[in-house]
Image (cartoon, coloured by chain):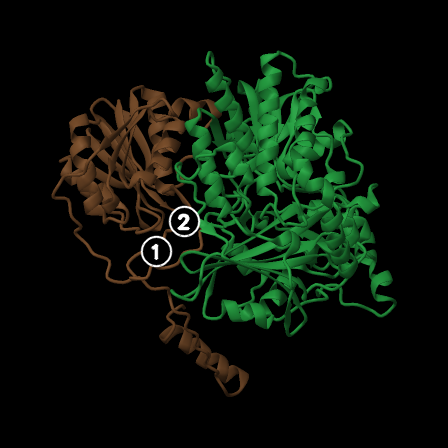
């Protein structure tokens, strides 16, 4: 009989990101203030160390941090590069046009940060409050009692490629909690299950984008910290939603990235190649000249906004941060909203536990807090903006300007939106009858390994590592589909959309077959989101595996 | 049995390395660190010996405050307490300096057995354990594949070249440097991680006169050199030249 460890806590948080840690800190803090027996708070995190799997630009709106820890400066938060210049450009293939006003992307008073460092600091703050942060433990299953969430089972460790237990096999732990806060990030595997199990979907399906980023270092004296540049246009076409960013940091560092909507039509479109093209643009290449790439990363982000939020409260559980979709895609900011949603969840959890009532109706206080507070004030007016971008860049821009001026009153109801993967066109619909080489991306560039890189080189710079002898963590329900219908209809888009070269179609003499290089996976979730057949299920690999985004 | 395990914190193997401005070490700002893998095997061996023979396992490490990460990890896996010789100067120290820093607090403890990894993943001198044995005036054996503990003695299997092994018997206290891969590493459990928070980590200052014995003059990234030689002539003649070149110049056959 297998011995399974059981841990009982009051509040369990899944995911040590800004949302989860804010919730944990809030619970621990108010429990300390109230005196008496402190509430036991545990946070589980799949990365080997805190901050290793977090990725963002990142420009921080400090309103969430101000609310959580008003004395953050005295506590030594790694938040010190105030935005000093803030520009938006529209890029054509060779030139740039500056927007006369910044509108929603106004970054006055915001800070350019390393989110990985920030999260590591926040972890320290949580631990100082008595929170147990367990890194290297991914949540693999939700524990229910009927419809009530009663905790989470972590993944088994020490299982080999064939699924057989190794001699150091360690079964997953059942962590049981009065309230479980799901902060498992964008397209979190547990939140995905929870939303499906308990039918929590919002009025509209969630839509996503993929952010690809590199950290560069330039010779001393060449970089003035605090400069923020956003771009629209090239290398994306009118039909593709997204834009680029360049943020300058101290120590000669530059964060450069491209965000691409995962609702593009061209099945041969490759977001990683689009990022290479972005860097090749004279306006960007000139900024990076003489520097070298230090790190690479990729991560999806939720862009659906207000109408895509699921119901975030269930009996015994709450959903916060990117897992729910608390992100303002028009401002390209989510950290502060993640933190605020975490604060609301922490307060709601404490209140519920004190009154010994963790029912869904009691935890609905979370929703009331969100609606009454600054989260709705920020997200509601821009509720239709992403949908408008679905009609093309110009329509989107016009609409976002309109929403800003009017608070979105003209379209009080929601504009319709469709789930991103459904927008992908088939090869024949997109390209007509002309034969296509489906192995090559439509936007491929030849990489020079100085400014532009191939996916494998980039993956090396993400520090990604997984124990090789473990089951594949990308579950493809039907691999026959890959060589038959998917190949015919879409030309195997997985080989293009994955920014880490996880998917390959190889032919060893018996026709093409799918090969999954799971150990390359940077946990961005793109495949789970955009696969047109929705047969890919991303599940957490053995705890500790994945990228190492230290300093990113 | 009282067992000490020396562990070192090193930069994670898959971390994209770069060299610092003075070319004397890697630039480890924002580096990701982990326990030196050979030391993890030494720790595992110590925990197994304790499970068989009882006693305690004490983790010993020398380095800056960040080393606490690997000490906590060792405690979470089951070590009982720790000694941390703490100093910034120990960040990229040579084997003799680390051994000297560890020797004084370890000598007081009167360990029956001291285990170290065979070598470190970063500098790879395989010296720290051997020099430490000298400082502690105890016998040592290197590249250990198996440890059998008897009364006042240990019998150990050493790995030699070419698939040969050697059994050595020696009196305890003794120091053994453990070969990687001799056991399967265990995972830290949640309970282990929680228990580790309450375990003692004794901070010790290094000896005042501690200094480097070696200085790294320069680190450099291997230069890629390619040489292509074309052999002309009829196929048989060209093949003959190729074979000759592989024998004489490349010396691979």
Dot 2 falls on a residue whose secondary structure is: loop
CA–CA distance between discs 1 and 2?
9 Å
State the residue position of label 2. B31
Chain coloured brown in the rendered structure:
B
Residue at left 19%, top 36%? B205
The residue singled out by tag 1 in the image is B26
* Upstream in sequence: badge 1 or badge 2: 1
Q: Position of residue B38 (x, y in %)?
A: 36, 42
Judge whether residue A171 can be spotted in this image: yes
Crowding around mark 1 (Cα neighbors within 10 Å: few <14, some 14 to 19, many 20+) is: some
Chain of the residue under label 2: B
Q: Residue at x 21, y 27 (%)?
A: B111
> Contact (CB < 8 A) between labels 1 and 2?
yes
Residue B184 visible? The answer is no
Relative to A289, residue A477 above or below: above
Element marked by disc 1: loop
Chain designation of label 1: B
In the picture, the quarter occupied by the N terminus of chain A is top right
**Could you say which is closer to the camera, residue A267 or residue A122?**
A122
Residue nearest the observer in this picture, B133 or B19: B19
Residue A397 image position (x, y, % from top left): 74, 57
Furthest toward the left, the residue is B209
Chain painted green: A
Query: Whole-percent x and y of residue B211?
Result: 15, 48
């Amino acid at each position: 009989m297998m011995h399974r460890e059981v841990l009982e806590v009051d509040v369990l948080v899944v995911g040590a990101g800004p949302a989860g840690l804010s919730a944990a800190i809030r619970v621990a803090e108010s429990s300390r203030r109230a005196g008496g027996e402190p509430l036991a708070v545990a946070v589980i995190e799949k990365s080997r160390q805190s901050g290793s799997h977090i990725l963002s630009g990142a420009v921080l709106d400090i309103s969430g941090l101000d609310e959580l820890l008003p004395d953050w400066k005295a506590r030594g938060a790694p938040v010190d590069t105030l935005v000093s210049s803030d520009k938006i450009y529209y890029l054509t293939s060779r030139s740039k046009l500056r927007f006369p006003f910044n509108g929603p992307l106004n970054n006055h008073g915001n800070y350019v940060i390393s989110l990985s460092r920030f999260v590591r600091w926040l972890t320290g703050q949580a631990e100082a409050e008595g929170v147990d942060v367990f890194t290297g433990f991914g949540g693999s299953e939700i524990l229910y009692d009927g419809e009530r969430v009663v905790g989470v089972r972590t993944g088994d460790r020490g299982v080999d490629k064939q699924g057989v237990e190794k001699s150091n096999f360690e079964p997953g732990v059942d962590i049981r909690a009065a309230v479980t806060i799901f902060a498992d990030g964008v397209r979190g595997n547990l939140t995905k299950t929870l939303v499906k199990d308990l039918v929590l979907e919002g009025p509209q399906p969630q839509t996503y984008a993929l952010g690809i980023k590199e950290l560069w270092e330039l010779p001393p004296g060449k970089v003035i910290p605090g400069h923020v540049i956003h771009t629209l246009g090239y290398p994306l076409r009118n039909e593709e939603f997204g834009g680029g960013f360049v943020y300058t940091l101290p120590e000669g560092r530059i964060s450069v990235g491209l965000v691409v909507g995962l609702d593009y039509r061209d099945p041969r479109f490759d977001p990683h190649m689009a990022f290479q093209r972005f860097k090749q643009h004279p306006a960007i290449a000139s900024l990076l000249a003489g520097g070298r790439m230090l790190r690479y990363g990729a991560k999806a982000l939720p862009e659906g906004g207000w109408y895509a939020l699921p119901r975030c409260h269930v009996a015994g559980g709450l959903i916060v941060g990117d897992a729910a979709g608390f992100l303002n895609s028009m401002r390209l900011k989510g950290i502060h909203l993640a933190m605020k949603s975490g604060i609301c969840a922490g307060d709601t959890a404490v209140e519920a536990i004190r009154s010994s009532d963790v029912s869904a109706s009691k935890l609905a206080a979370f929703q009331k807090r969100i609606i009454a507070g600054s989260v709705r004030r920020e997200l509601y007016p821009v509720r239709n903006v992403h949908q408008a971008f679905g009609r093309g860049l110009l329509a989107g821009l016009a609409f976002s300007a309109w929403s800003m001026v009017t608070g979105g009153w003209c379209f009080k109801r929601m504009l319709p939106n469709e789930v991103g993967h459904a927008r992908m066109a088939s090869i024949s619909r997109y390209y007509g009858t002309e034969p296509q080489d489906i192995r090559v991306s439509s936007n491929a560039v030849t990489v020079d390994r100085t400014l532009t890189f191939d996916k494998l080189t980039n993956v090396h710079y993400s520090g990604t590592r997984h124990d090789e002898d473990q089951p594949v963590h990308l579950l493809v329900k039907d691999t026959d589909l890959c060589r038959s219908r998917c190949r015919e209809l879409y030309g195997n888009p997985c080989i293009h959309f994955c920014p880490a070269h996880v998917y390959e179609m190889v032919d060893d003499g018996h026709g093409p077959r799918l090969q999954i290089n799971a150990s390359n996976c940077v946990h961005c979730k793109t495949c789970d989101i955009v696969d047109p057949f929705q047969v890919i299920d991303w599940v957490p690999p053995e705890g500790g595996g994945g990228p190492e985004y230290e300093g990113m | 049995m009282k067992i000490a395990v020396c562990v070192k914190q090193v930069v994670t193997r898959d971390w994209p390395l770069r060299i610092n401005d003075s070319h004397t070490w890697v630039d480890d700002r924002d580096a990701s660190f982990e326990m030196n893998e050979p030391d993890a095997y030494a720790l595992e061996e110590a925990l197994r010996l304790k499970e068989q023979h009882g006693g305690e396992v004490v983790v010993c490490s020398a380095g800056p405050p960040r080393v606490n990460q690997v000490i906590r990890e060792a405690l979470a896996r089951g070590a009982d307490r720790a000694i941390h010789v703490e100093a910034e100067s120990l960040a990229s120290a040579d084997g003799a300096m680390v051994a000297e820093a560890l020797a004084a607090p370890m000598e007081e403890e009167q360990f029956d057995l001291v285990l170290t990894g065979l070598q470190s993943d970063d500098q790879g001198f395989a010296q720290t354990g051997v020099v430490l044995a000298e400082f502690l005036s105890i016998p040592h054996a290197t590249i250990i594949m198996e440890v059998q503990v008897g009364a006042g003695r240990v019998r150990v299997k050493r790995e030699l070249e070419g698939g040969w092994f050697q059994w050595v018997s020696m009196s305890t206290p003794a120091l053994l440097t453990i070969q990687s891969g001799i056991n399967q590493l265990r995972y830290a459990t949640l309970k282990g991680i929680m228990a580790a928070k309450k375990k003692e980590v004794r901070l010790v200052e290094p000896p005042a006169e501690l200094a480097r014995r070696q200085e790294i003059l320069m680190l450099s990234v291997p230069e890629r050199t390619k040489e292509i030689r074309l052999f002309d002539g009829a196929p048989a003649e060209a093949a003959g030249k190729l074979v000759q070149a592989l024998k004489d110049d490349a010396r691979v056959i």
